[in-house]
Amino acid sequence: MNLNMKQLKQQLISALGILVVRIGKILPANFSPLGSFGFFSGNPLLFFLSILIFDYFFGGFYLGQSWVYLAFSIYPLLGYLSRGKIKRQVFLIPLASLLFFVISNFGVWLNWYPRTTEGLVHCYLLALPFYGRTLMGDLSFGYGYLLLRQLVKKYQHHFLVPDKIN
């Protein structure tokens, strides 16, 4: 199996795992590995496909959802901009959460709240608990991924298995 097929297989398994977590409602709302998957997968198409499949079969579609998809695009974009540099990733993961919050809730405000300053403030205040869970999920899964990657890199010689055993 060449490296591209191996990477695609790993990404498909990750996407399936995310779907299972979201479908099974194992984690609280907005606390999920989805943002981290978008940030680290390097495959925006698979990322958006997993979101669309979930929304089609389980989540449903609603007015203003295009703003949520626009907000989700921040994760692969910032993941790409991090270029695999750990310091950038540590900074950009929480920034992605913040931008997701700002963009997606702007769409909520446009579609469901009075288009006034009071309506805008009210919308963002009511969304703060969701932002907290999004941020905690992105930090837990994103930084967890970074930690695991560093541990594997540091101790990979312990995990090497010969291709053929005689």
Image (cartoon, rainbow, N blue to C red):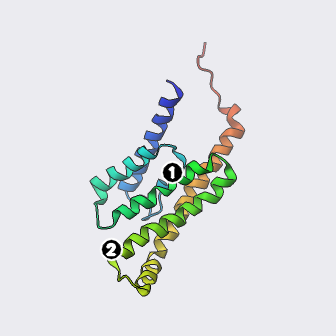
Q: Helix, strand or loop at disc 1?
A: helix
Name the mark on residue 137. Answer: none
- Looking at the rendering, which quadrant does residue 91 occupy? bottom right
How packed is label 2: few (under 14 Cα within 10 Å), some, or many (20 or more)? few
Q: Residue at left 59%, top 16%?
A: 164
What x and y, as percent, mark residue 133?
Answer: 50, 67
Compare marks 2 and 1 and give the one earlier in the sequence.
Answer: 1
Q: Amino acid at mark 2?
A: Asn
Q: Amino acid at mark 1?
A: Pro
81 relative position to 32: left or right: right
Q: Residue at left 28%, top 54%?
A: 56
What x and y, as percent, mark residue 53?
Answer: 32, 50
What x and y, as percent, mark residue 1?
Answer: 49, 24
- Looking at the rendering, which quadrant does residue 142 occupy? bottom right
90 relative position to 37: left or right: right
Name the mark on residue 111. Answer: 2
Q: Residue at left 43%, top 83%?
A: 122
What x and y, as percent, mark residue 88?
Answer: 66, 54
Quadrant location, the C terminus: top right
Disc 1: which residue = 76
Any part of residue 109 in sight? yes
Disc 2 versus disc 1: distance between alpha carbons? 26 Å
Residue extending farthest to the top is 166
